[in-house]
């Protein structure tokens, strides 16, 4: 369960699930909601596929996996719409896109199909959190420097702005997310020499 | 005119990769040489062009609140929109299966070089993403949806081909060791994204 947090991180080492990792990270709150949603879907999809692993015929396993994941995502989507409508609006299509998040297919194929339910559940939680860590780091820097806030609260005192400090509007724009992730990869690979190419 | 505007917008301004980061997994993994990248781009464009009008019809005549009224008065109040995700992903998966058979028959070399990424177009976020955007923006007819699909597909094709060309050149340059491979690819994609933002002012 601990491995995916750093050494085997789904986003920066296995390069899976990049799409949503980048698109929802302009602010902290959507990023955290996204982390929770993905972790929940991943853990339960892993358990369900692991329980069914002996009964799924090999040739149609992708369709079965997609249907299981899609059903779970529909549940998450409806719960979010009911309890946190603003965030659900901010995430727009990206909740639906959890279905096509490569982390899910990757873990289902690589782990849940060959393992018992309990390890699969832990694997799902671990990978969900590994994904979440990157989301939270990226959104922390983007929100802090892009709008000077965290969770919507002002962080930099007003006199900074009076003294001439300005928010870096660039950080809010999509391309900066890629560059922040690249910096995380850079630091991570300096620490873990065996990952360098 | 409306449609031309939508077409240009979806290629350059609302580019699937640079504005929404959709389809990044295969974008990063298959962009090591231009030929394969171009082949995958064509395949994605094709799936988008076919998938969007079909899903538009499904959305219009089956899923929307009140869409079933053509069946008769008693169905007019039905709202099946919660089934959207499952139906869309099923349509896309079926289309991709079909495309796989066609490519295997007519171009075995492309089939071999695309390898595992061909069946994975089914889980390419660019396709489901375009379908969900189509649903969200409520396009007036199937033709507009097709134009949007073609535009998004060509935008994706353009992005992956450019990145592949840059990465082929990259093997001659001295990149810091920890950045080699995936790190520098992210930075290049970011810079390309910034370059594409210069199209933002275009209005037709």
Image (cartoon, rainbow, N blue to C red):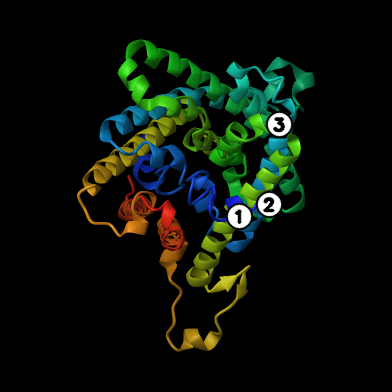
Which residue is at a point 44% across and 65% down the rendered structure image? Answer: A171
Q: From this viewpoint, is residue B6 visible?
A: no
Q: Chain of mark 2?
A: A
x and y, in percent, of residue A138 in the image: 52, 61
Mark 2 touching mark 1, by CB under 8 A?
Answer: yes
Q: Quadrant of residue B59?
A: top right
Q: Which residue is identified by label 2?
A: A36
Q: Quadrant of residue B33?
A: top left
Q: Is residue B184 above or below residue B79?
A: below
Q: Which residue is identified by label 3?
A: A50
Q: Residues within 10 Å of mark 1 (few under 14, many from 20)?
A: many
In 3D space, how far apart are the residues under numbered discs 1 and 3 (Cα atoms)? 23 Å
Q: Secondary structure at mark 1?
A: helix
Q: Tell which circle, 3 or 2, labels the residue nearer the N-terminal end.
A: 2
Mark 3 touching mark 2, by CB under 8 A?
Answer: no
x and y, in percent, of residue B82 in the image: 70, 33
């Amino acid at each position: 369960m601990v491995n995916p947090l750093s050494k085997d991180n789904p986003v920066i080492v296995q390069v899976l699930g990049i799409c949503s990792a980048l698109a929802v990270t302009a602010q902290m709150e959507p990023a955290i909601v996204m982390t929770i949603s993905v972790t929940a879907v991943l853990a339960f999809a892993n358990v369900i596929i692991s329980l069914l692993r002996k009964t799924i015929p090999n040739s149609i396993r992708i369709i079965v996996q997609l249907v299981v994941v899609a059903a779970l995502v529909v549940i998450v989507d409806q719960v979010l719409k009911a309890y946190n409508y603003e965030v659900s609006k901010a995430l727009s299509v990206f909740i639906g896109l959890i279905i096509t998040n490569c982390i899910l297919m990757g873990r289902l194929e690589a782990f849940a199909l060959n393992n018992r339910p309990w390890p699969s559940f832990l694997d799902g939680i671990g990978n969900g959190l590994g994904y979440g860590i990157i989301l939270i780091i990226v959104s922390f820097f983007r929100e802090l420097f892009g709008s000077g806030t965290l969770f919507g609260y002002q962080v930099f005192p007003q006199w900074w702005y009076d003294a001439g400090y300005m928010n870096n509007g660039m950080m809010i724009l999509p391309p900066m997310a890629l560059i922040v992730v690249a910096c995380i990869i850079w630091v991570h690979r300096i620490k873990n020499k065996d990952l360098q190419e | 005119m409306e449609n031309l505007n939508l077409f240009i917008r979806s290629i350059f301004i609302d580019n699937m990769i640079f504005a929404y980061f959709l389809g990044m997994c295969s974008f990063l993994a298959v962009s090591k040489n231009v030929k394969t990248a171009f082949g995958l781009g064509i395949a994605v464009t094709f799936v988008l062009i076919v998938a969007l009008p079909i899903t538009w019809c499904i959305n219009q005549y089956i899923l929307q609140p009140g869409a079933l009224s053509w069946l008769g008065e008693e169905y007019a109040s039905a709202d099946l929109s919660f089934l959207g995700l499952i139906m869309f992903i099923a349509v896309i998966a079926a289309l991709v299966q079909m495309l796989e058979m066609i490519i295997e028959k007519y171009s075995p070399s492309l089939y071999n070089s695309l390898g595992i990424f061909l069946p994975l177009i089914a889980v390419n976020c660019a396709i489901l993403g375009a379908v969900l955007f189509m649903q969200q923006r409520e396009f007036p007819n199937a033709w507009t949806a097709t134009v949007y699909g073609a535009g998004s597909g060509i935008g994706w094709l353009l992005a992956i081909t450019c990145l592949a060309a840059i990465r082929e050149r990259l093997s001659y340059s001295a990149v810091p060791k920890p950045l080699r491979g995936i790190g520098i690819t992210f930075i290049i994609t970011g810079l390309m994204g910034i370059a594409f933002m210069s199209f933002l002012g275009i209005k037709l």
